[in-house]
Image: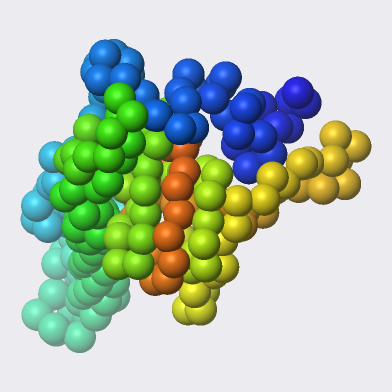
Amino acid sequence: MSSVEEECPSGLTPKELTQRFGTNTEVGLSSAQAAEKLKQDGPNELERPPRPSFLALFAAQLCGFIIILLICAALASVAVNATSAQASDPLSYTTAVAIFVIVLLNAGIAAYTENQAGGALEALEKMSAPYITVIRDGQTQKIETVKVVKGDLVLIETGDVVPADIRLIEAADVKVAEQCLTGEPDDVTKTAKVKKHNTGGGDTEKLTPENMCFSSCNCTSGKGRGVVVATGMQTRIGKIAALMGGGSK
């Protein structure tokens, strides 16, 4: 197996998937295997660090080197004008006032933007569904999404939210909305075809391969079965959350 395919589950055959993730594409994981994997990898959820208040974010913006220089310049301007012959003229303080206004506006906008990013992370968390159908011990059962582990055999159908990044091994008219990942408004058709990668470097993996479904995306049509290849912060949506300040487990 090439190093490219080692990194790209979309290029693995069902047999290679079972070997890599220690599962069975017919009966799924055993309860003991699932418990061990859950202990090893942790729950299938996005990490949420303590969210600072807007006031704390605003104060942090005022501690930047450039901002401190601007504040010092404004204070120096006030001091110079206060000891000059024009000390009683309000217009002589225009420069200092302008600097203070620019500093406060800049800090306010930056703090608001950072605060909104924290809200976006919470929105990502709300996109997941509480339960999903899997096959374990050869039996179909519903489990909590946070207990899904790598190697789980997941069943998805119309209306389901994909619980983790999965590599499809069966797909019947499956379409998935991937707008949360790509911004593309149209549903994407998914298949179970193996996509072998060119080891010469001329063929690269697509952002969202057609034989994979990704965490937090909605299944809008069809039915499918797939093997979980990434959970929690290791999913595509988890990596987006990490870039937004959600950690990097």
x then y, percent, for residue 13: 66, 34
Q: Which residue is drawn at 26% across and 14% down?
A: 32
Instruction: Report whether 60 appears left or right of 200.
Output: left
Q: Residue at x 73, y 32 (%)?
A: 4
Coloration of the structure image: rainbow
Assign the N terminus to one quadrant of the image: top right
Inspect this view and state whether residue 82 appears: yes
Assign the C terminus to one quadrant of the image: top left
Determine whether 86 is above or below 66 in the image.
below
Determine whether 147 is above or below 63 in the image.
above
Q: Residue at x 20, y 43 (%)?
A: 142
Q: Quadrant of residue 158?
A: bottom left
Instruction: Report whether 239 appears left or right of 197.
Output: left
Inspect this view and state whether residue 180 appears: no
x then y, percent, for residue 133: 27, 46
Q: Nearer the viewer, residue 106 or 35?
A: 35
Q: In which quarter of the image is residue 148?
A: top left
Instruction: Report whether 11 appears left or right of 131.
Output: right
x then y, percent, for residue 24: 47, 26
Q: Which of 108 and 179 is in front in this view?
A: 179
Q: Residue at x 78, y 41 (%)?
A: 197
x then y, percent, for residue 101: 22, 73
